[in-house]
Amino acid sequence: MTIKACTKCNRITNDERCPVCDLPSSTNWSGLLIIIDPDKSDIASELNINIPGEYALRVR
């Protein structure tokens, strides 16, 4: 099982397509960001993340 990241929203997934935005996922990603409470997170608001979860910092 390969861990992938969405090419649009950077959400980490194991699927070929992102479960949130239904776009292709890439195996070429780096950095891991875990958002627990996006409403109180300055980083989440800076990166426009509204859904809790695991995100990649860079996806190619």
Image (tube, grey):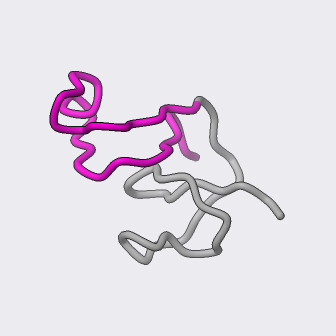
At 49% across and 32% down in the image, what residue appears? 33
Residue lying farthest right? Answer: 1
In this picture, residue 31 sits left or right of residue 46 = right
Q: Is residue 51 magenta?
A: yes
**Which of the pair 53/25 is nearer the observer?**
53
Q: Is residue 33 magenta?
A: yes
**Which of the pair 35/17 is nearer the observer?**
35
In this picture, residue 17 sits left or right of residue 21 = right
Q: Quadrant of residue 4?
A: bottom right
At 43% across and 77% down in the image, what residue appears? 22
Q: Quadrant of residue 14?
A: bottom right
At 24% across and 38% down in the image, what residue appears? 38
What x and y, as percent, mark residue 16?
Answer: 64, 74
**Which of the pair 12/41 is nearer the observer?**
41
What x and y, as percent, mark residue 19?
Answer: 46, 73
Residue stretch in magenta: 32-60
